[in-house]
Amino acid sequence: MFNGESDDIPFLKFEGIDPVSLEVFRSFFKTMRFHHQLVFKMTSEKGIYPGQAMCLWFINQEPGISQRDLAEKLHVAPPTVTHMLQKLEKTGFIVRRDDERDQRLSRIYLTDTGTDMLSVLSGIFAEIIRISLNGLNSQQQQELMHMLDTMSSNILREL
């Protein structure tokens, strides 16, 4: 488990990258890593993992979603979704039903247990947001959002 500065991944100097940009990237990378660890810790304490939580969220948004469409929304390979859905089905969070028009397709729905877990997850993610933004006032949050949106746009253009 990472616990601070001593656990940072060492970054080398890169030609054409100024020291401030390198430090910004280091801080951003560290924040992403710690965020991932916090999400994993808090969801796994409830018996579910982040990828499964996202599955439940998308299924709730689009009841009856196909496995293929779910894989696309999660940006993962279909076998990965198959594995996640098997675990979610085994825990009683989802149910799969054959499509009425195309028997080759199965549609995915939340069960009552899955809906209950989604409520638990909602509370967890609200707490993660509070923890993550603690100490930032509204203006700072707006500025951070703008900067992160700019970074996302830059990356998306390359994808």
Image (cartoon, helix red, strand yellow):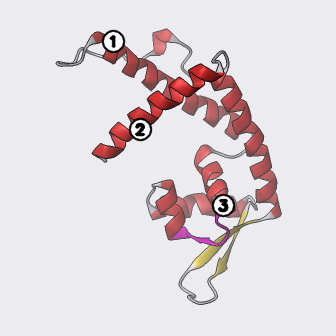
Read off the magenta span: 60-67
Report the Cα–Cα distance between label 1 and label 2. 19 Å
Q: Name the residue under label 2.
A: 152
- x, y percent for residue 85: 61, 62
- 64 in the magenta segment: yes
- Outermost residue, left side: 15
Quarter holding residue 62:
bottom right
- 124 in the magenta segment: no
Considering depth in this image, is 112 or 123 the residue closer to the camera? 123
- x, y percent for residue 119: 79, 48
Report the Cα–Cα distance between label 2 and label 3. 23 Å
SS of the residue at dot 3?
helix
Q: In the rendered structure, which disc, 2 or 3, sits on the residue that comes first in sequence?
A: 3
Name the residue at 61% across, 51% down.
Answer: 54
Q: Name the residue under label 1.
A: 20
Picture mark count: 3
Name the residue at 77% across, 39% down.
Answer: 123
Asked whether disc 3 touches disc 1, contact meaning CB atoms under 8 Å apart, the reply is no
Give the vertical position of 74 relative to 63 (above or below).
Answer: above
Q: Name the residue under label 3.
A: 61
SS of the residue at dot 2?
helix
Which amino acid type is marked by label 2? Ser
Which amino acid type is marked by label 1? Val
Q: Residues within 10 Å of mark 2 (few under 14, many from 20)?
A: few
Q: Residues within 10 Å of mark 3 (few under 14, many from 20)?
A: few
